[in-house]
Amino acid sequence: MESPIGMEYMCVLVAFSAIAILGFVFVVFFEAYKRRNNHQHVEVPAIFEDPNSLKQVPCPHIVDPAAKYISLIIPAFNEEHRLPGALEETVNYLQQRALKDPSFSYEVVIIDDGSSDETKRVAFEFVRRYTVDKVRVILLGRNHGKGEAIRKGMLHSRGELLLMLDADGATKVTDLEKLENQIRAVAKREFHHGDSSDSDPSFRISDVPVAVFGSRAHLEEKALATRKWYRNFLMKGFHLVVLLAAGPGIRDTQCGFKMFTRAAARKLFSNVRLKSLCFSLQVVL
């Protein structure tokens, strides 16, 4: 027979989950209603600056053909201290791959989300060092939120593959190969239902809509042991919302390490409307 305390805990969890679901649904509908006649945020072009010529140049758009193999999109808001280390590690890795494989081309797109510190200066130092063809900075002017920063970066990148990653360096850039291998395997199955697509000249990975998400779910037990009980309670409620909304199989929607083919990014980020951290849920759903 279950104890009254256990039953009370379950009732509280169910009640909280119901409130969380209603809250999320309200946020989505409120944002959709607020933007129902406003498409300006989609149509206004982003601008990146060449620090050498001091000119502002319109960015390419996701509807254009890919001009690079991979784009790494890094949103940055007041990241002057963590950004240099993350960029150094990222560019070094990309350069090493380019040396080994001449067909490997890349760009790093940093989106300055209205930072009030020296993030812009730090980012432009890397542009000067590696050229504007390899490292680009999109300036949003004011703070819009991480979701909007990533959306802008995705819509104005040149890669066949597009990877979003955080400026804090929490995920090793070398792990992108795990996502890359998965996305290639899925794309080949979708395109040709076999391995012959590698030699098929009509196969282009950028044309097959596939998304692969990194996950920190394997670190959950360690995190549960170190976090406060109420944060664990909120996390479990959030996971229940995701389970009910998206179904089983997705254990971590918030990991800032997600890769998309160009076709997938075109479909998803042309329709994302949430500007805050909740944008990850909208992408998944």
Image: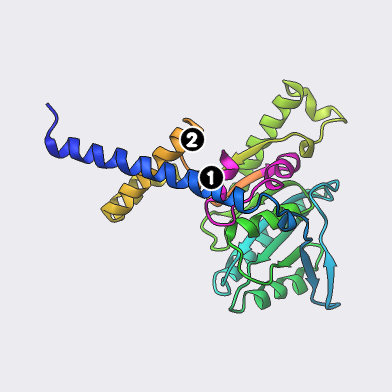
Quadrant for the C terminus, please: top right
Q: Residues within 10 Å of mark 1 (few under 14, many from 20)?
A: some
Q: Residues within 10 Å of mark 2 (few under 14, many from 20)?
A: few
**Near-viewer residue (21 or 191):** 21
The magenta stretch spans residue 273? yes
Q: Residue furthest top?
A: 193
The quadrant where residue 82 appears: bottom right
The image shows residue 199, relative to residue 114, as above or below, that is above
**Near-viewer residue (22 or 258):** 22
**Tag 1, which secondary structure?**
helix
Query: What is the three-letter code of the residue carrying label 1?
Result: Leu
The image shows residue 51, relative to residue 199, as above or below, that is below
Q: Residue 106: percent from the left, percent from the top?
A: 76, 54
Left or right: residue 144 versus residue 106 is left
- Give the CA distance from mark 1 to mark 2: 9 Å
The answer to whether the residue labelled 1 contacts the one labelled 2, judged by CB atoms less than 8 Å apart, is yes
Which residue does the image show at 49% across and 47% down from the upper left? 26
Left or right: residue 144 versus residue 277 is right
Q: Residue 4: percent from the left, percent from the top?
A: 12, 36
**Tag 2, which secondary structure?**
helix
Mark number, residue 27: none
Specify whether residue 89 is in view.
no
Left or right: residue 267 versus residue 201 is left
- Span colored in magenta: 260-285
**Near-viewer residue (119 or 178):** 119
The residue tagged 2 is 245
Q: Residue 85: percent from the left, percent from the top?
A: 58, 68
The residue tagged 1 is 281
The magenta stretch spans residue 230? no
Mark toward the start of the polypeptide (1 vs 2): 2
Query: What is the three-letter code of the residue carrying label 2?
Result: Ala
